[in-house]
Image (cartoon, grey):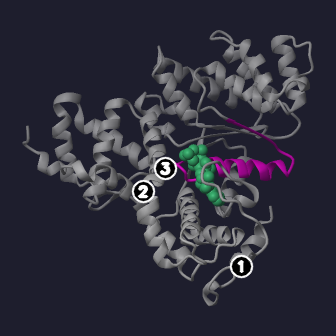
């Protein structure tokens, strides 16, 4: 990718032109999947920090709010390191139901590195066939069939050690690990298994030659709150935390401008800034979705350019409307995956209050604690834990006058969802 030439083009001052012409490189619109290469915007300073940590051999815990671009930055980092002689292995374990699945996923990721996959397969299963005769998925299935509760630790450890012994340095990204752990937690003997899994991973990784294999664990559910809740915070103390924040105005505007150029969508001066102002914060996915909705709007209404007024119309009618609700569902689902049922209900109470009342104040917090005290025991402790998750996951931020949504879009979504039947916490005091 040629980021610098893109950057140079973006440095053009658009104030004197009423619309942006197609400037060359095409940036595809992405409103769901991760992005990399020419579709990947900005994040240069974050990539520099991650690159330095990985080269120094430090394992990383990559966190950040939903849709912030964690998967994309991990993939982009891997792509750039690959171009410099590293091996990049990526696996998403969101769908894994047991430890054996995680090891099988790792095997699938390793499959293209023939020297490693062949050695591993031969040692583990005595493969007669050559591993190149299998697709990565078939390879996964074969390996999975040989794994069970008694041997995944040994084989998984061997696989990671085989990767580290490879003659090129290896970056291994395990994405959505906290979702997998949360699932295990809900199964038989869950807390012990989560502990055993994290202890195993730490032991294997710490036994490797420094710099031979670097691990990045990432996910949109906080791993830290999870291990804290289980009383085992030291299981992840070998990981260097890195939190991915939102884009600033400049980067959000740059992304929007590049999309407009690539899609030859004429935009009036001020439109990209108005998009940032409407969103309140630069969550990359929201910038891209906004562009997609504006593009649809211009087509549907036969417009020849996007105006600042259109930005506000589309915000209200499309982003907050039915199509935007799909995105909201994603946030709700992830929240549900990260919290136990009762905690989820309380989290929704807090978010509804913060959305409709603009903030979740100290006195609202006391009311909530009183409300839930008869059902949950240590209500203040529980509310504190949930707030920690909501802040950690980027829904809310702590301020002098209470907790607020940094994202206007998220706040408006939540308030649209609850507005019609919401009674503020302080008004519920003393009600039956
Ligand atoms: N650097 C970037 N440049 C352009 N668009 C981006 C960038 N990072 C993220 N996006 C946008 O955000 C969307 C989500 O990105 P990604 O899947 O990487 O985020 P995530 O934090 O992993 O999300 P989730 O919490 O759902 O796992 C992408 O489809 C894309 O629209
Ligand atoms: Mg992701």
Residue under the image location 44 percent in, 37 percent down:
225
In the image, residue 304 sits, relative to residue 83, either above or below, namely: below
Reading the chain from its start, which is encountered first: label 2 or label 3?
Answer: 2
Q: Residues within 10 Å of mark 3 (few under 14, many from 20)?
A: many
Residue farthest to the bottom, as pictured: 16
- Is residue 188 rendered to the left or right of residue 209? left
Residue 317 visible in this rendered orientation of the protein: yes
Reading the chain from its start, which is encountered first: label 1 or label 2?
Answer: 1
- Is residue 412 rendered to the left or right of residue 148? left
Determine the image quadrant of residue 264.
Answer: bottom right
Q: In x, y percent, where is residue 92? A: 65, 35
Q: Which residues are magenta?
A: 62-91
Marks 1 and 2, Cα distance to the nearest angstrom?
Answer: 30 Å
Mark 1–mark 2 contact, CB under 8 Å? no
Locate the C terminus by quadrant. top left
Residue under the image location 63 percent in, 67 percent down:
255
Residue under the image location 42 percent in, 42 percent down:
332
Report which residue position mark 2 lands on: 321
In the image, residue 260 sits, relative to residue 241, either above or below, namely: below
Report which residue position mark 1 lands on: 21
Between circles 2 and 3, the one closer to the viewer is 2
Report which residue position mark 3 lands on: 327
Q: Residues within 10 Å of mark 2 (few under 14, many from 20)?
A: some
The secondary element bearing badge 1 is classed as loop
Q: In x, y percent, where is residue 404? A: 34, 58
Give 53 or 412, whichever is nearer the viewer. Answer: 412
Q: Residues within 10 Å of mark 1 (few under 14, many from 20)?
A: some
In the image, residue 219 sits, relative to residue 7, either above or below, namely: above
- Is residue 121 rendered to the left or right of residue 208? right
Between circles 1 and 2, the one closer to the viewer is 2
Marks 3 and 1, Cα distance to the nearest angstrom?
Answer: 30 Å
Q: In x, y percent, where is residue 416? A: 33, 54
């Amino acid at each position: 990718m040629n980021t610098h030439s893109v950057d140079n083009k973006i440095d053009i001052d658009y104030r004197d032109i009423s619309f942006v012409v197609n400037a060359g490189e095409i940036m595809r619109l992405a409103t769901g999947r991760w992005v990399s290469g020419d579709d990947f915007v900005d994040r240069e300073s974050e990539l520099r920090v991650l690159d330095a940590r990985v080269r120094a051999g430090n394992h990383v815990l990559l966190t950040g709010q939903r849709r912030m671009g964690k998967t994309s930055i991990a993939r982009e980092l891997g792509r750039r390191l690959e171009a410099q002689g590293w091996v990049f292995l990526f696996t998403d374990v969101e769908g894994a139901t047991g430890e054996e699945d995680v090891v099988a996923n790792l095997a699938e990721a390793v499959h293209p590195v023939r020297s490693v996959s062949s050695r591993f397969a031969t040692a583990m299963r005595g493969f007669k066939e050559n591993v190149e005769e299998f697709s990565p998925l078939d390879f996964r299935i074969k390996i999975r069939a040989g794994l069970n509760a008694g041997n995944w630790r040994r084989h998984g450890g061997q696989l990671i050690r085989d990767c580290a012994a490879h003659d090129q340095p290896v970056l291994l990204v395990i994405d959505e690990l906290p979702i997998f752990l949360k699932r295990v937690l809900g199964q038989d003997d869950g807390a012990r298994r989560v502990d055993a899994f994290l202890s195993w991973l730490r032991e294997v990784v710490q036994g490797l030659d420094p710099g031979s294999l670097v691990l990045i664990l990432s996910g949109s559910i906080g791993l830290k709150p999870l291990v804290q809740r289980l009383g085992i915070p030291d299981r992840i103390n070998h990981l260097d935390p890195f939190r991915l924040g939102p884009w600033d105005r400049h980067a959000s505007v740059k992304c929007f401008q590049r999309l407009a150029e690539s899609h030859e969508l004429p935009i009036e001066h001020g439109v990209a800034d108005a998009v940032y102002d409407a969103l309140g914060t630069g969550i990359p996915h929201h910038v891209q979705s906004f562009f997609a909705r504006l593009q649809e709007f211009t087509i549907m209404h036969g417009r020849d350019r996007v105006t600042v007024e259109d930005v506000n119309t589309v915000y209200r009618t499309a982003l907050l409307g039915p199509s935007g609700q799909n995105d909201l569902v994603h946030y709700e689902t992830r929240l549900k995956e990260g919290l136990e049922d009762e905690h989820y209900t309380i989290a929704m109470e807090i978010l509804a209050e913060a959305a409709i009342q603009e903030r979740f104040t100290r006195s609202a917090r006391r009311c909530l604690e009183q409300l839930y005290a008869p059902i949950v025991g240590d209500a203040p402790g529980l509310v504190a834990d949930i707030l920690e998750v909501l802040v950690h996951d980027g829904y809310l931020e702590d301020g002098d006058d209470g907790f607020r949504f940094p994202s206007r879009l998220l706040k408006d979504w939540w308030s649209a969802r609850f507005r019609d039947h919401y009674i503020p916490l302080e008004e519920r005091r003393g009600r039956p």
